[in-house]
Image (cartoon, rainbow, N blue to C red):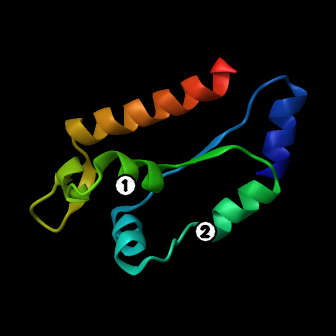
């Protein structure tokens, strides 16, 4: 990752990372209080690589709503890909993140 970021920088390009949660990872994080991506976030912080923690952003955006409502198989095992509602939410989060980053 560090080399990839350096290569991008040498070409005048920005490098960013989006950490997407699996459903299991998301549910584990907010049921146990332990972040399964904490070591990745720490490594990105150490390398000063900007990243978006999508699990935290989704959790903040939906408040107390059910994460499973964002998935295609929401009523059967809380799994699948994002449904249209989930895709819209993810797109809005990424757009807002990039807009803030490039606005300055």
Residue situated furthest bottom in the rendering: 32
Graded by Cα atoms within 10 Å as few (under 14), some (14 to 19) or many (20 or more), the crowding at tag 1 reads some
**What's the residue at 15%, 57% (across, down)?**
74
Residue situated furthest top in the rendering: 103
Residue 26: x and y in percent read: 38, 64
Q: Dividing the picture into quarters, in which one does residue 28 lie?
A: bottom left
Q: Which mark is residue 59?
A: 1
Is 88 located above or below residue 62 in the figure? above
Horizontal side of 54 relative to 74 (left or right) equals: right
On the image, numbered disc 2 is attached to which residue?
38
**What's the residue at 87%, 40% (across, down)?**
6
Image quarter (top left, top right, bottom left or bottom right) of the C terminus: top right
Residue 79: x and y in percent read: 23, 61
Residue 45: x and y in percent read: 75, 56
CA gap, disc 2 and disc 1:
16 Å
Q: Which mark is residue 36?
A: none
């Amino acid at each position: 990752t560090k080399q990839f970021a350096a290569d991008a920088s040498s070409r005048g390009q920005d490098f960013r990372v989006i950490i997407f949660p699996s459903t299991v990872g998301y549910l584990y994080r907010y049921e146990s209080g332990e972040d399964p991506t904490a070591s990745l976030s720490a490594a990105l912080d150490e390398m000063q690589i900007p990243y978006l923690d999508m699990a935290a952003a989704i959790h903040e955006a939906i408040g107390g709503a059910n994460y499973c409502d964002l998935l295609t198989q929401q009523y059967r095992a809380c799994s699948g890909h994002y449904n249209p509602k989930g895709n819209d939410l993810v797109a809005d989060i990424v757009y807002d993140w990039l807009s803030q980053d490039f606005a300055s």
